[in-house]
Image (cartoon, rainbow, N blue to C red):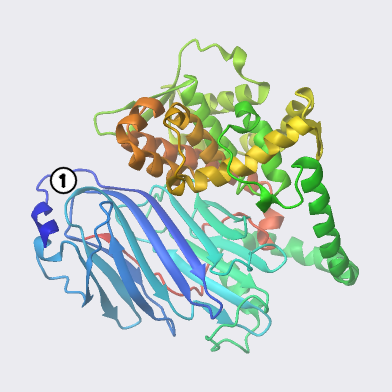
Amino acid sequence: MAAAACVVAPSVSAQDSFVHDIDINIRLTSDGTALVREIWNVDINRGTEWYLVRSNLGDMRISGLRVTDETGSQYADDGFWNSDRSFGEKAFRCGIVEKEDGCEICWGLGSHGSHIYTVEYSMTNAVKAMLDYDKLHLQVVSPGVRPRPQHVKVTISSDRDSVRFADENTGIWAFGFNGTVNFAEGSIVLETSSPFESDAYSVISLCRFNKDVFTPTSIAEKDIPFQISLDAAFEDSAYEDFLDAEERDRKTRNGVIAFFTAMIVFVAGLKASLNRKRNREMFGVLKLKEIGYERDLPFDGNLYETRYVLKKISAVSSDANMASALILKMIKNKYLTVDNDADGKILISFTPNADLGALCESEREFLSMLKASSGEDGVLQEKEFSRWSRRVANRELITRWITDIPSIGASFLAAHGYGAGTRFSPEGQKHARRVVGFRKYLKDFTIINERKSSEVALWQDYLIYAALYGIADKVARELRDINPQAFEEYVGYSYPTMSRVLLFSNSMGASITGAVAAQQTKSSVGGHGGFSSFGGGGGFSGGGFGGGAR
């Protein structure tokens, strides 16, 4: 194999190793099979192989293993994996070690250093049929992973365009980490707000689906009500503390259930009618899919106005996106400065004597919160901000700041003559269409044949908007692939540095979202999304203990 010439022998020195980011995408088929894609962004300087633990599988089976790395090379599937082989013998190969209650998914490191591994496989019977609902209860990242992950994002969706997860058909809870679980554009998104600080951290997802969403082939629990699983998962969790209050409210809720049930059909029809009215008044079209690609920045780069429109069409995943976009904008406009230390770690500090006159009050308040969390050295640290945001007074400050953002967007729209509510002027409709069309343009950037060379000057703005849309990592990779030299020249930093900046901004944004979620506990306990519980989650399938480099 030609790639074998690139194999580097194991490093003798004990350099630091990192798992910078784990991005997991799970698509669920109608029969309850999970189609899994995991992307591991790592710097690794020890061991000969990488492994993922998948234990407690029960009737689930894993197959269709496919591993690639950042070069696009597909690893040869050995089927059975022999961990006793040498570093070179394992390189560019993958396989599975069968265990008594599960398996280990393994592949050779190939070389030490920076890698982005993509591993794909299918897991049958992931969704279980229960008496009253169906459920997905998976540990998707195991405790004991080494090196410990700095950031994890898990997206769960259906492989059918017609199925979108939302309050109406799904309940969601998360366990094992500090962070959030929310609905986002028909998907379920779990995201950590701080790095794994011990071997106890993991990522566990529990989802409750209405009976008309799936037709699971796994029926071993078909006579068990979902509440049994939920009670087991809630044991020793942060959710459990609020169950008594929920019970007190139950009688009151039951009194209005019949009324709301009778209104469901009426509301569904009314919602469709209101959406058409909103689209006509706000965008000048009846259906948003009529809007084509747009290349110009919506609202001339005003993030508040753009986010207002996104919220109106429920197309923004979380408040974290706004915070992430603002961080990138402040880096572009030199309010924040990015450097690298001797180990390649990014350092984000505040530009001395920066003129804040061009910032709106909300932006100045955001910058003030970042400064307050940075400590005496004036350098932004993810852990510092995470700790700062968990204090009650600071949670309230963050929540108020987030809550004010829609009204700030509305004020800008009115001041610029673009409209109010959903009634936009012709010029406002043009910009509103750009919000939707520019998002389509960024998502399809690599398949569009009519890109203009003059657009490279806007690449830094593209990344800011991509962060607002929740697709910054994808857009950054595509811009890098188009022209690495232009990326560094016009974005201002090399791709590795900007990649770490994006991870940092995502983590900071997730901490903000987590602080807001902590103020919304009842919603979280009820399965409507919000904060995750570090404890609890018992009764899951998959997972185990361990994983990473060995």
Q: Residue at x 24, y 29 (%)?
A: 342
Between 251 and 476, the residue placed more toward the observer is 476
Q: Is residue 151 above or below residue 460?
A: below
Quadrant of the drawing holding the C terminus: bottom left
Along the horizontal axis of the image, is 332 left or right of 404?
left
| Amino acid type shown at disc 1 | Ala
Q: Name the residue furthest front.
A: 450
> Is residue 393 depicted above or below 416 in this figure?
below
- Looking at the image, residue 496 sits to the left or right of residue 349; the answer is left
Q: Is residue 199 visible?
A: no
Establish if 471 lies above or below 23: above
Quarter residue 237 falls in: bottom right
- Residue ID for mark 1: 14
The answer to whether 102 is drawn above or below residue 417 in the figure is below
Q: Quadrant of the N terminus?
A: bottom left
**Viewer can see residue 439:** yes
Q: Residue at x 60, y 49 (%)?
A: 317
Locate residue 326, reporting x and y percent: 55, 31
Q: Residue at x 53, y 43 (%)?
A: 441
Residue drawn at x 33%, y 63% is 119
> Are there few (<14), some (14-19), or many (20+) residues within 10 Å of tag 1?
few
Where residue 336 sits in the image (x, y, percent)? 46, 22
Question: What percent of the width, then of the height, locates residue 502?
Answer: 43, 38
Q: Number of callouts in the render?
A: 1
